[in-house]
Amino acid sequence: MPEPGRALPQPTPETQHFWDGTKAGELRLQRCDDCRHVYFPPRPFCPKCGTRKVSVFAASGKAILDSYVIHHRKVPGFEPPYAIAVVKLDEGPRMMTNIVECPQTPEALQLDMPLEVVFAQQNDAITLPFFRPTRG
């Protein structure tokens, strides 16, 4: 019997724009049309002022490593060791993700290191955003 894979999110009407974006190779965020607050995760109202006047836009895909832990136990869909990270996007919000294309060691995973988004298609509906050290 094959091993179960990574648990995948279930898009909702409030998050569908985000998943459509990742499938298209864009990291889409929301910005409040009233107070200009940029936020993540997706929701139909601004978490700062409460208005429902919000817009969706493509983020730069740039971030810095804000925090992480290296997980060493086997979990379905993950090969240890792997980093569970919080990145701070250039636009301001933080998001939880995995760091890829980099050794999963404290020596390689330096806080505030510049990162860029990469996308990994999981199935026809879900493409996940991960982050790797900025190239170049």
Image: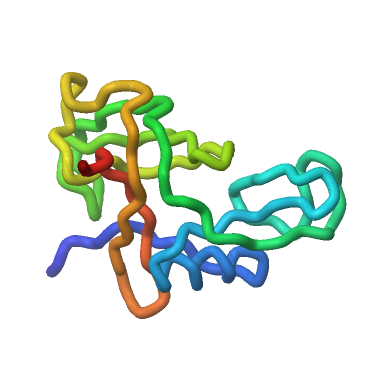
Left or right: where does residue 110 sit relative to residue 15? left
Left or right: where does residue 14 sit relative to residue 113? right
Extreme residue in the front direction:
136
> Which residue sits at x=24%, y=52%?
76
Q: How is the image coloured?
A: rainbow
Seen from the viewer's position, the closer of residues 106 and 114 is 114
Q: Quadrant of residue 123?
A: bottom left
Q: Quadrant of residue 104?
A: top left
Does residue 108 sit above or below 118 in this rendering?
above
Residue 72 spot, x, y in % from top left: 19, 31
Number of numbered discs visible in the structure rendering: 0
Q: Quadrant of residue 43?
A: bottom right
Residue 2 spot, x, y in % from top left: 14, 67
> In which quadrant will I find the N terminus?
bottom left
Residue 64 spot, x, y in % from top left: 40, 32
> In which quadrant will I find the C terminus?
top left
Extreme residue in the bottom direction:
124
Residue 106 spot, x, y in % from top left: 20, 20
> Which residue sits at x=37%, y=66%?
127
Seen from the viewer's position, the closer of residues 120 and 53 is 53
> Which residue sits at x=22%, y=43%?
135
> Which residue sits at x=25%, y=32%?
71
